[in-house]
Structure formats: C-alpha cells, structure tokens
Image: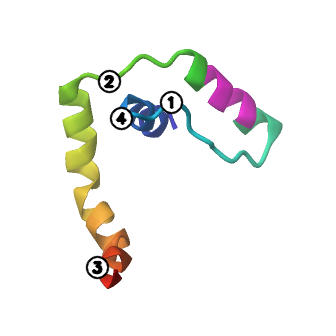
Amino acid sequence: MHQAMGYTLSLLGVHCCVIAAETVAQLEHNVTVARAFKPLVKSEMAEIEQRTATTWQENTFFRSWT
C-alpha cells in the first residue's frame, strides 16, 4: 500500500486518494501510510512505472474503445 499510495499522491494534480478498507486494521494501516507520506522522487516514480508497465497495458485495453 505504501508504494501505491505514495505513487498516486506524488502525481501532479492529485491531492487525495480514496482507499477501501475491509477491516479496521487495514484502515488504521492506510492512515499510518498517509500520515508518513513524502512525495516520491522521479527515480522512485520511474521504478514503479517500469515494474507495473506490463500490468498497466494489460488492464487498460478498454481505453482504445473510445
């Protein structure tokens, strides 16, 4: 969750994110991660983008429909 939330909140123009929690423990963990948030540097952003590129391409196929 730390990387996903950090990446999302580090994007230009993003000021918050909504994360579903199934348990109180998950919610508490998400709040802890959000409170510790520091914007990622470009190299950290690029690393996450590289690791997730294939998955992103596989799961955004529907965008070509419009």
Residue type, label 2:
Leu
Whether 22 is among the magenta residues is: no
Residue 10 lies in quadrant:
top left
> Which of the image's four quarters has the C terminus?
bottom left
In the rendered image, which residue does mark 4 sit on? 11
Identify the residue shown where x is 32% and y is 77%: 61
In the rendered image, which residue does mark 2 sit on? 40
Give the answer, above or below, for where 27 lies relative to 40: below
Q: Say the numbered circle drawn on residue 15.
A: 1
Point out the tag, 3 or 2, that comes first from the N-terminus: 2
In the rendered image, which residue does mark 3 sit on? 64
How far is the residue under mark 4 from the one under mark 1?
9 Å
Q: Residues within 10 Å of mark 4 (few under 14, many from 20)?
A: few
Point out the tag, 4 or 2, that comes first from the N-terminus: 4
Image coordinates for residue 24, horizontal then vertical, percent = 81, 36
Pick out the residue farthest to the bottom: 65
Identify the residue shown where x is 35% and y is 35%: 11
Instruction: State how the image is colored.
Output: rainbow
How far is the residue under mark 3 from the one under mark 2?
30 Å
Residue type, label 3:
Ser
Pick out the residue farthest to the right: 24
The stretch of residues the image draws in magenta is: 27-32
Identify the residue shown where x is 73% and y is 28%: 28
Point out the tag, 3 or 4, that comes first from the N-terminus: 4
Q: Is label 2 or label 1 in front?
A: 1
Q: How many marks?
A: 4
Element on which disc 4 rests: loop
Give the answer, above or below, for where 27 lies relative to 50: above
Residue type, label 4:
Leu
Point out the tag, 2 or 1, that comes first from the N-terminus: 1
How far is the residue under mark 4 from the one under mark 2?
9 Å
Residue 56 lies in quadrant:
bottom left
